[in-house]
Amino acid sequence: VLQADTNIMESSYSQDAEGMLNKVKIYDEDDQYLGVVQNDELIGLLGTLQDIYIKEDGKQAKAVARSMLRGITQEISVTASGDISCTSGRPIKIAGSLTKLLGSFYIESDAHEWSNGQYITTMKLKF
């Protein structure tokens, strides 16, 4: 458990909608409309960002189109007092309201640094 008032030294959180795609229209090779997949929640938040998928033989068109949808990219970075158990793939909890990051996450990447007698762990987290 990381806590803002004890072992978190620095934290940051950002969101990026640049690569977002929330609607995919499906057509066949003769330009006949077959359907659509979309994320209504993201369309309501940010408007429509769409692409077109032309159905390929032997592929499930809706499944391929659904795999094209992309949400908002979130990046969380935390620097804390060193902890050897904070390694990629492990779960971690953040408590305390100072960071505005509360809840359970998993560690996507980690770096451990020993310098001048101080041990620091820097992590990238995912929800």
Image (cartoon, grey):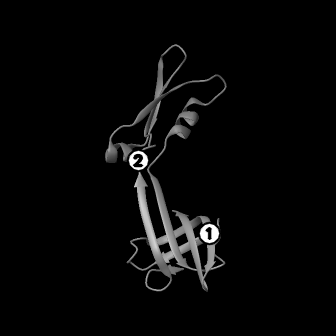
5, above or below 54, in the image: below
Who is closer to the viewer here, 112 or 39?
A: 112
Query: As shown in the figure, which amino acid type bears the numbered disc 2?
Result: Ala
At label 1, counting other C-alpha atoms closer than 10 Å, the crowd grade (few under 14, some 14-19, many 20 or more) is some
User: Which-is-in-front pick, marks 1 and 2?
Assistant: 1
| 40 with respect to 66 (left or right) | left
Q: Position of residue 59 (x, y in %)?
A: 64, 29
Near-viewer residue (118 or 41): 118
Q: Which residue is mark 2?
A: 17
Residues tagged 1 and 2 counted as in contact (Cβ below 8 A): no
Q: How far across and down, in percent of the image, does residue 56 sit? A: 61, 23
- Mark 2 Cα shell of 10 Å, populated few (<14), some (14-19), many (≥20): few
Q: Tell me the residue at 48%/86% (across/down).
A: 6
Residue 111 is marked as 1
Question: In this image, 59 relative to 21: left or right?
Answer: right
Residue drawn 66% across and 78% down?
Answer: 84
Place of residue 94 in the rendered image (x, y in percent of width and height, measured from the top left): 49, 75
Number of dots carrying numbers: 2
Task: For the N terminus, give its image quadrant.
Answer: bottom right
Residue at the spot 32% in from the left edge and 41% down from the top edge: 47
Question: Mark on residue 122?
Answer: none
